[in-house]
Amino acid sequence: MATTDEEQRAATSAFAVNGAAGDGRVGPLGVPQGLSDAEYHDEPMTLQEHLKELRDRLIKTAIGVGVGMALGFFLAQFVTNYFVQLVNRSCAAVVNGHPRCQVVALSPTEQIVVYFEIAFYIGVALAMPVIVYQLIRFLAPGLTKTEKRYVYLLMPFILIFFTLGVFFSSLVAIPNMMHFLLNFGNQQITNMISIESLLGFFSKLALWTGIMFELPLVMFALATIGVANYQFQRKTRKYAVVVLMIVAAVITPTPDPGSMLIVWAPMYALFELGLILARIATGRRDRRLAAKPAA
């Protein structure tokens, strides 16, 4: 027997029953205890509607990345020049009358491949507001109007923190790593550096550093929607120290602890900032729940 939309909506609502014991009240994705259904204006969605919504959001995200990638082609030359000049500044020694460090292309197609890679990473960076917005819109049916307002207010800061992460990586972390890598070992050996390995890796590093700089905003959002309040996040501090060290070690290319600490220190500072924001968000949420009449 075919399942009607009404039956699917009922099943979706039944799956989202509130509370540990279930009090019978339902919402779009389950109304948290203490909040009234009136705060939600979205209707429950069927599985097919969720999948259609996901498809539409992914298509719009891909379009945003595509537009950003098109703009990235115009910036790829600037990025390439920056890293080539960075190599020249970090390795100024001369061996047998030739520069000790040279950036080379090892195949006829290497430079065009690098251009596409750089354009893609720039496209993702430029499309970050679109990516985040589409993600929020997909999750919006499960948020109250108050929570949606907080999340939308975060969007400008998402772009700001991501940009700060990219600039920190490009202007602070990467130059220090390059200096260590290019001046380590025998000074009589010439470093022949592939342009693809150079730009590909450091573009990934800049991208991941930008993403990690979103940590305090993620912590604030989780506290705002009640997924992880301040008390829970504070208990994770000792684990966060170790986890962030592992992340810093993974995304940095050098084995020396100095480069890892350069990346780890701001990430841990951002974690502490996230705890402050989470405390503010949890306090506001608790006061809002306390002001609600008991069901």
Image (cartoon, rainbow, N blue to C red):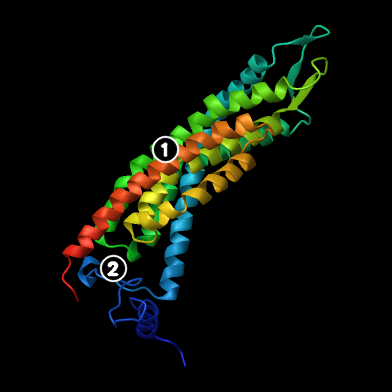
Mark 2 lies on a secondary structure that is loop
Seen at 59% across and 28% down, the residue is: 174
Judge whether 41 appears above or below 91 on screen. Answer: below
Residue 160: percent from left, percent from top: 39, 36
Q: What amino acid type is highlighted by mark number 2?
A: Asp
Residue at mark 2 = 42
How many numbered discs, if any? 2
State left or right for residue 170 relative to residue 218.
Answer: right
Q: Quadrant of residue 194?
A: top right
Residue 25: percent from left, percent from top: 27, 79
Q: What amino acid type is highlighted by mark number 1?
A: Phe
Q: Quadrant of residue 109?
A: top right
Q: Quadrant of residue 157?
A: top left
Which-is-in-front pick, marks 1 and 2?
1
| Residue 289 vs residue 130, the one in the foreground | 289
Residue 252: percent from left, percent from top: 63, 36
Judge whether 108 appears above or below 189 on screen. Answer: below
Q: Local crowd at mark 2 within 10 Å, few (<14), some, or many (≥20)?
A: some
| Outermost residue to the bottom | 1
Residue 150: percent from left, percent from top: 28, 51
Residue at mark 1 = 161
State left or right for residue 96 relative to residue 17.
Answer: right
Seen at 43% across and 87% down, the residue is: 3
State left or right for residue 19 relative to residue 93.
Answer: left
Mark linked to residue 256: none
Judge whether 250 appears above or below 170 on screen. Answer: below
| Residue 115 vs residue 229, the one in the foreground | 229
State left or right for residue 229 relative to residue 214.
Answer: left
Q: Local crowd at mark 1 within 10 Å, few (<14), some, or many (≥20)?
A: some
Q: Are marks 1 and 2 in contact (CB under 8 Å)?
A: no
- Mark 1 and mark 2 lie on one chain; the one further toward the N terminus is 2
Q: Is residue 74 visible?
A: no
